[in-house]
C-alpha cells in the first residue's frame, strides 16, 4: 500500500501499482482514527459521507478529467449550434456530489437538476456545492412510479448529462433510456463511458442501445473524443469516450 500523506483528518492508501484490479473491484483503505478499513470505489455512500474524500481520491490522486472534458465538448457544440448555455435546463444523471453541475454552471449553463440513486449523493452535493442544483431527486430510474416520473420530467429538460456513471454496476441501459425519454426532442445529450462500451464486443448493453439510437436517427452525434478518464489504481490510464449528441425524435 502507498500511503497518501495529507492534511485531511484521515489517512488514505491505495494498492501497490503492481496489483491490478478490475475497475468495478478497485478499492482504497482509509483510517479515520479507528484503524484501516477497505472502501470499494463503488461504495459511494461511504465515500460521500467523508467530506473531500471523493475529490482527494479521484481528482487529486487518480487525476479524473471526465467532468471538464465532457462539459467543454458540450459547450463547444452548443456554440456551434448557436445555443445559449444560459437557456439550457440539464438533467444530470448519476449526479453524485455535484462536480458536473459545478462545471456546467461555471460554463454559464442556466439550470441543472440532479438525479442519483443514493441519498448520500444528494446530501454531499448540498454540503459541498450548495446551490448548484435547482433540484435533486433520489430515485431508481428503472423503477419510477408515475408520480416520480412526472415530478422529474416537470423540469422541462433540453439536455441530459451522465458522467462517469454508465455501466460497471452503476447506471444500466434501462435507467439511461428512462432519463433520455425525459429530454425534449432536439435536446442535447452529453455522456462519458468506457471506450470499449461502444465497441462490437461490448457486453454492457450500451453499444447496442446507443448504436441503435444513432442508426435509427433518434440520436445525432455532434462530437466525440477519447481521453484519459482517470488513472486506475495500477496507475494505468483508463480510456473513456465523451460523446455529445442531439436527440432528434422520440422513441419509435
Ligand atoms: C462515479 S460517480 C460519478 C458522479 C458524478 N457524475 C461525477 O462525475 O462526479 C457515479 C454515480 O452514479 C450513481 N449511480 C449509480 N447507479 C445509479 C443508478 N442506477 N441511478 C442513478 N445513479 C446511480 C452513484 O450513486 C454515483 O453517485
Image (cartoon, rainbow, N blue to C red):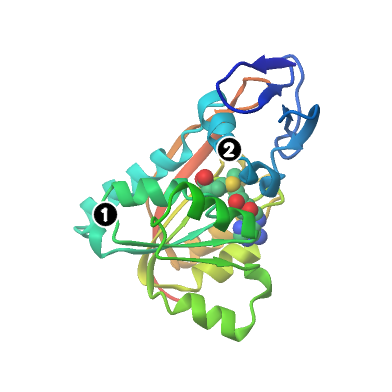
Look at mark 1 in the image and give the residue it sits on.
78
Q: Is residue 39 above or below residue 151?
A: above
Residue 40 percent location from the top left of the image: 74, 38
**Along the horizontal axis of the image, is 182 left or right of 165?**
left
Pointer 1 local density, CA inside 10 Å: few below 14, some 14–19, many at least 20 = some
In the rendering, which numbered label is found on residue 54? 2
- Residue 101 at least partly seen: yes
Residue 235 percent location from the top left of the image: 62, 20
Instruction: Residue at the far bottom: name it.
Output: 146
Secondary element at image label 2: helix
Residue at image point 50% right, 80% down: 151
Q: Is residue 89 above or below residue 207?
A: below
Label 2 CB-ligand 1 distance < 8 A: yes
Q: Is residue 47 above or below residue 208?
A: above
Which quadrant would residue 12 be assigned to in this image?
Answer: top right
Q: Is residue 212 above or below residue 101?
A: below
Pointer 2 local density, CA inside 10 Å: few below 14, some 14–19, many at least 20 = some
Residue 57 percent location from the top left of the image: 59, 30
Seen from the viewer's position, the closer of residues 221 and 136 is: 136
Amino acid at each position: 500500500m502507498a500511503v497518501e500523506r495529507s492534511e485531511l483528518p484521515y489517512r488514505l492508501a491505495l494498492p501497490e501499482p503492481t496489483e491490478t484490479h478490475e475497475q468495478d473491484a478497485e478499492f482504497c483503505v482509509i483510517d479515520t482514527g479507528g484503524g484501516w478499513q477497505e472502501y470499494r470505489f463503488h461504495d459511494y455512500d461511504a465515500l460521500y459521507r467523508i467530506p473531500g474524500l471523493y475529490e482527494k481520491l479521484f481528482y487529486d490522486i487518480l487525476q479524473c478529467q471526465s467532468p471538464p472534458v465532457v462539459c467543454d465538448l458540450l459547450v463547444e457544440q452548443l456554440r456551434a449550434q448557436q445555443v445559449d448555455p444560459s437557456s439550457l435546463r440539464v438533467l444530470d444523471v448519476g449526479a453524485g456530489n455535484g462536480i458536473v453541475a459545478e462545471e456546467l454552471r461555471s460554463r454559464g449553463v442556466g439550470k441543472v437538476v440532479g438525479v442519483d440513486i443514493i441519498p448520500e449523493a444528494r446530501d454531499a452535493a448540498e454540503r459541498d456545492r450548495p446551490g448548484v442544483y435547482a433540484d435533486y431527486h433520489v430515485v431508481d430510474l428503472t423503477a419510477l412510479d408515475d408520480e416520480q416520473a412526472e415530478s422529474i420530467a416537470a423540469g422541462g429538460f433540453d439536455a441530459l448529462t451522465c458522467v462517469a456513471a454508465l455501466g460497471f454496476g452503476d447506471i444500466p441501459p434501462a435507467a439511461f433510456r428512462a432519463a433520455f425519454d425525459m429530454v425534449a426532442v432536439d435536446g442535447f445529450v452529453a455522456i462519458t463511458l468506457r471506450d470499449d462500451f461502444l465497441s462490437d464486443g461490448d457486453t454492457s448493453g450500451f453499444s447496442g442501445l446507443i448504436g441503435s439510437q444513432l442508426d435509427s436517427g433518434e440520436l445525432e452525434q455532434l462530437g466525440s473524443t477519447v481521453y484519459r478518464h482517470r488513472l486506475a489504481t495500477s496507475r494505468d490510464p483508463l480510456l473513456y469516450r465523451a460523446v455529445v449528441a442531439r436527440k432528434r425524435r422520440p422513441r419509435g
